[in-house]
Amino acid sequence: MTKTSNIPEPNPSWDYYITWHKLLKAKFHLDDLMEYISKLEEASADSNEVVEEDLSKIIRILESVLPKIETE
């Protein structure tokens, strides 16, 4: 594995490559959101909307990582 930004870059043939990639994407969005809110002095309707949209995006990405439970 090579490293980019202190995060190992796995081989695309690895079984968990897609999961790894989705988690990295969620982490990127979470880091951006945390940086955004750290610069805010006070909450506003606009900032709350941005936070809600970004959190929804992160949740959708994480939900896509959950294993699918097969029912008979």
Image: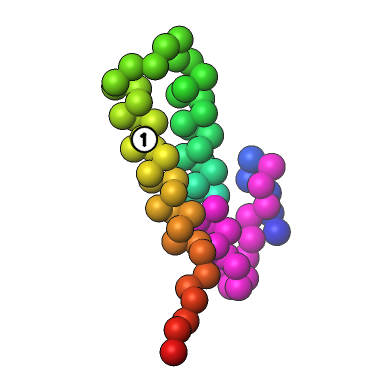
Q: Nearer the viewer, residue 33 or 43?
A: 43
Out of 53 and 18, give the one closest to the viewer: 53
What is the quadrant of residue 19 in the picture?
A: bottom right
Q: Name the residue located 33 percent from the left edge and 17 percent from the top edge.
A: 44
Vertical position of residue 42 compared to residue 6: above or below:
above
Q: Residue furthest top?
A: 41
Residue 25: image location, x then y, percent: 49, 48
Whether residue 64 appears in magenta in the rendering, the answer is: no
Residue that carries the numbered disc 1 in the rendered image: 52
Please tell me which residue is depicted at 42% across the width and 40% down the height of the picture. 55
Q: Tell me the quadrant of the picture where the C terminus can be found.
A: bottom left
Say which element carries label 1: helix
Q: How is the image coloured?
A: rainbow
- Counting every numbered tag in the picture gives 1
- Which residue sits furthest bottom? 72
Residue at left offset 50%, top offset 38%: 30
Q: Please, is residue 48 above or below residue 41 in the view?
A: below
On the image, the x and y values in percent for residue 65 come to 50, 62
71 and 40: which one is in front? Answer: 71
For residue 60, side relative to residue 11 (left or right): left
Instruction: Work out which quarter of the rendered image holds the N terminus and state it.
Output: bottom right
Report which quarter residue 20 is drawn in.
bottom right
Q: x, y (%) of residue 68?
A: 48, 73
Residue shown at the point (47%, 40%) measured from the top left: 29
Say above or below: 1 vs 53: below
Q: Is residue 28 above or below residue 39?
A: below
Amino acid identity at mark 1: Glu
Mark 1 Cα-neighbour bin, 10 Å: few <14, some 14–19, many ≥20: few
Instruction: Write down the region rendered in magenta.
Output: 6-23
Q: Whole-percent x and y of residue 37?
A: 47, 22
